[in-house]
């Protein structure tokens, strides 16, 4: 499939061929994720949907994420029925979000690479549940796509070198610390902290520190 752009085009074409509206490829979050967006490798989900998902804190208590942590078997989802299992009182918020963006039904396909990293490829839309033959077809490409994207990221990471201070500053930024707080923690001036953050942002070809943190996490530069 070539580049990430080629993979993205292929996944969207596959989704449309099956009468689905979109796809998402993720790393399966750890037991204590801070948000969902930083675990997304690529997706056709609208940016405002991802932002709304994180703003509502829907990753906490997500029955889908919990299922992906416990099983490697493909499974279908229905936004209404699946989210009824939420224990955080956010079932209606989650249902409206997926229905409002044309992704109320679909399926998740767990994936892994040779290093044991776990991910998942999902497709969603408004059509009825996928047939068994369709599930088998989409499941067959999940590991392939997940492995290829991670390999592309690894090769790109080899070309990005962040200094220890740049990584420290991005790490604290990912924890929600301000430049002033980071300067106190690291014993540096606020100007120096901003210098490291700006330099890391340029190296990662990001538009701001938030995007720089996301790119650094996706590239495996931050834990």
Image (spheres, rainbow, N blue to C red):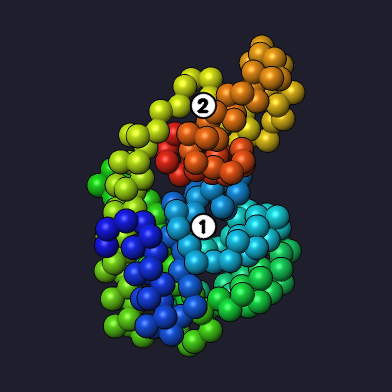
Q: Nearer the viewer, residue 123 or 7?
A: 7
Coordinates of residue 185 in the picture (x, y in percent): 67, 17
Task: In the rendered view, tell whether residue 24 sits above or below residue 179.
Answer: below
Q: Considering the numbered disc 2 on the image, is that residue within a helix, a strand or a loop?
A: helix
Task: In the rendered view, tell whether residue 133 sits above or below residue 122.
Answer: below
Q: Quadrant of residue 159?
A: top left
Residue 167: give its label. Answer: 2
The tally of labels here is 2
Residue 45: give its label. Answer: none
Residue at 51% across, 58% down: 65
* Residue furthest top in the image: 187
- The answer to whether any part of residue 58 appears in the image is no
Residue at 45% across, 27% down: 162
Q: Quadrant of residue 103?
A: bottom right
Q: Nearer the viewer, residue 12 or 132?
A: 12
Coordinates of residue 39 in the picture (x, y in percent): 50, 50
Q: Nearer the viewer, residue 183 or 61?
A: 183
Looking at the image, residue 139 sits to the left or right of residue 78; the answer is: left
Residue 66: give its label. Answer: 1
Q: Which of labels 1 and 2 is toward the front? A: 2
Distance in Å between CA atoms under marks 1 and 2: 30 Å
Coordinates of residue 105 in the picture (x, y in percent): 52, 78
Q: Considering the numbered disc 1 on the image, is that residue within a helix, a strand or a loop?
A: helix
Residue at 30% across, 41% down: 155
């Amino acid at each position: 499939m070539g580049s990430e752009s080629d993979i993205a085009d292929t996944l969207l074409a596959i989704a449309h061929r099956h009468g689905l509206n979109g796809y998402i490829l993720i790393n399966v979050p750890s037991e204590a994720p801070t948000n969902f967006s930083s675990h997304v490798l690529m997706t056709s989900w609208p940016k405002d949907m991802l932002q709304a998902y994180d703003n509502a804190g829907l990753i906490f208590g997500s029955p889908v994420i919990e299922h992906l942590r416990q099983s490697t078997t493909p499974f279908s989802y229905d936004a209404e029925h699946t989210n009824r299992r939420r224990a955080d009182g956010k079932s209606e918020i989650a249902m409206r979000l997926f229905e409002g963006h044309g992704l109320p039904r679909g399926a998740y396909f767990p994936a892994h690479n040779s290093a044991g990293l776990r991910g998942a490829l999902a497709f969603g839309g408004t059509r009825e549940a996928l047939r068994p033959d369709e599930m088998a077809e989409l499941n067959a490409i999940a590991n392939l796509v997940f492995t290829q994207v991670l390999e592309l990221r690894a090769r790109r990471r080899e070309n990005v070198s962040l200094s220890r201070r740049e990584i420290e500053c991005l790490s604290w930024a990912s924890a929600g610390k301000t430049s002033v707080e980071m300067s106190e923690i690291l014993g540096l001036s606020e100007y120096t902290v901003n210098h490291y953050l700006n330099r890391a942002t340029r190296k990662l070809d990001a538009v701001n520190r938030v995007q720089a943190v996301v790119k650094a996490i996706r590239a495996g530069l931050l834990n």
